[in-house]
Image (spheres, rainbow, N blue to C red):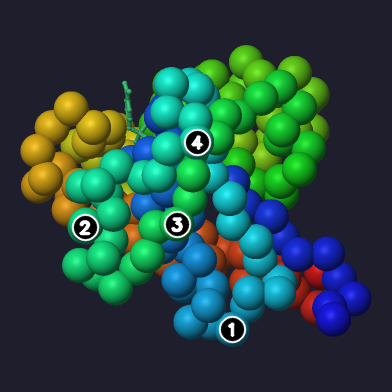
Amino acid sequence: MSETEPIRLCFVCLGNICRSPTAEGIMASLIADAGLQTRIEVDSAGTASWHRGEPADARAIAEAARRGVALRSRASTFRTGDAHAYDLVLAMDHTNRFDLLDLTPEPELRERILLLRSFDPALADDDPHDGAVPDPWSGGEEGFAMVYDLIEAACIGLLDHVRTTMLTEGHR
Ligand code: 4NP
């Protein structure tokens, strides 16, 4: 058993059935590939509760399966105080981030709430999505492929960040 507490990450979107389950699944897969399952834990939630208890959207599950990643989460809702349970809370878009900040009055916890794509090392100043993962829910399947690519690039950068700055010896 590990003597240290794992790093806990929570991915958050609106419904918790498209973007954040995709991020949770991709990150879990990257963590498993790196053999870090006991050091980093992943979770996801939505700022809205409309889909609570539901599995991920079938289009998100299909896109992830096409890339070899299983999405197993059930939708849950992010509540006031939940930021306490995580080291980082990764918002998919700016509205998600503002909603999370509204649920988190404590300054030291607000610092943990970041945009997922801020970890994409290739994120450009003139990013067409303004640094967000756009909501694919009301669009077609091609939107789910695009969103998958954005999330994967950011999760690779996020894992690198966690490994180099949060899992270093003596810290955790
Ligand atoms: P998500 O996508 O936030 O990526 O899970 C959505 C899912 C459902 C709805 C909106 C966005 N909805 O309005 O029900």
Q: Earlier in the sequence, mark 1 or mark 2?
A: 1
Left or right: residue 80 compared with residue 108 = left
Q: Residue at x 9, y 47 (%)?
A: 142
Could you classify mark 3 by the number of other residues whose Cα lies within 10 Å: few (under 14), some (14-19), or many (20 or more)? few
Q: Nearer the viewer, mark 1 or mark 2?
A: 2
- Cα distance between the residues tagged 1 and 3: 19 Å
Residue identifier under label 2: 63
Which quadrant holds the C terminus? bottom right
Q: Nearer the viewer, mark 2 or mark 4?
A: 4
Residue identifier under label 4: 53
Which type of secondary structure does the marked residue at label 4 adopt?
Answer: loop
User: Which label belongs to residue 35?
Assistant: 1
Left or right: residue 118 compared with residue 129 = right
Left or right: residue 5 compared with residue 135 = right
Q: Earlier in the sequence, mark 2 or mark 3?
A: 2
Q: Earlier in the sequence, mark 1 or mark 4?
A: 1
Could you classify mark 4 by the number of other residues whose Cα lies within 10 Å: few (under 14), some (14-19), or many (20 or more)? some
Q: Nearer the viewer, mark 1 or mark 4?
A: 4
Could you classify mark 2 by the number of other residues whose Cα lies within 10 Å: few (under 14), some (14-19), or many (20 or more)? many
